[in-house]
Amino acid sequence: MCNYDNEYYVLKKIDDDIYPSLTPLKETTSIRFNRKMPEPGQILKFKNRWKDDNETAGINEDIGSVLFNGVDILVDEEIKEILSTESLHKVGYYPAIYISDEDVWIEDYQFVTILNRIDAWSREKSSYDKENVGINNKYYLSKIVLDQSVLDKIPYEKRQLFKLDSSMVNLTLIHKDLLMKFSDRIDSRIAIPVATYQG
């Protein structure tokens, strides 16, 4: 196991209905917010895709400082300020509103657009279905082992926060040093060490 597997964490929503799974409102879907940097005046709006089911089941949502739209993240203003001080490579921020299950508009979120994509997983050591190849040679990874030879060549400043490329699910990876700067504001369960991640 290379050292990087213990230095990086996968950011992932906790698998529990109490935590909202975001979906964009119709006016937001046309913005392509996870594929391009924000333009002035663009504001994203999200709601919980399981709102109706939660209401039926009597589930009260737990709204944290980090919210998930699939594998993409929204962060509160305090975490955004921490991230902004790092001059992260190919990372931008859209002002975002989360409309809670009780129809409260929470306006202090930022959607983190990560265009920094690094194909950094080892084909020899990772676990994946070699026969199940998606578009553009993307694979579904059940266990990740990072390729040290790839990351060694990239300056730290350009790999603090990135999307894992050439995988079916473009997971968000964050370096532990950056994560520790706001770890006191998050539920530790959303950050899974690459070394123990199971897809």
Image: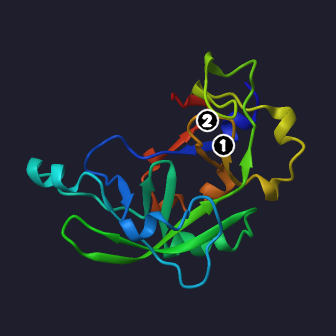
Residue 109 visible in rendering:
yes
x, y percent for residue 14: 38, 44
The residue identified by callout 2 is 194
Q: Residues within 10 Å of mark 1 (few under 14, many from 20)?
A: many
SS assignment at label 2: helix
The residue identified by callout 1 is 8
**Residue that sits furthest to the top in the current view:** 131
Left or right: residue 8 versus residue 45 is right
Quadrant in which residue 67 is drawn: bottom left
Q: Earlier in the sequence, mark 2 or mark 1?
A: 1
x, y percent for residue 50: 25, 51
Would you place residue 15 above or below residue 125 in this image? below
x, y percent for residue 86: 72, 68
x, y percent for residue 66: 45, 60
Total marks shown come to 2
Would you place residue 57 above or below residue 145 in this image? below
Q: Amino acid at mark 2?
A: Val
Quadrant in which residue 87 is drawn: bottom right
Q: Are marks 2 and 1 in contact (CB under 8 Å)?
A: yes
Q: How is the image coloured?
A: rainbow
Would you place residue 49 above or below residue 140 in this image? below
SS assignment at label 1: strand
The residue at 57%/64% (across/down) is 112
Quarter of the rendering occupied by the N terminus: top right
Q: Amino acid at mark 1?
A: Tyr
Would you place residue 61 above or below residue 26 in this image? above
The residue at 82%/33% (across/down) is 148
The residue at 75%/34% (across/down) is 3
Q: Residues within 10 Å of mark 2 (few under 14, many from 20)?
A: many
- Say which of 171 and 4 sits in front: 171
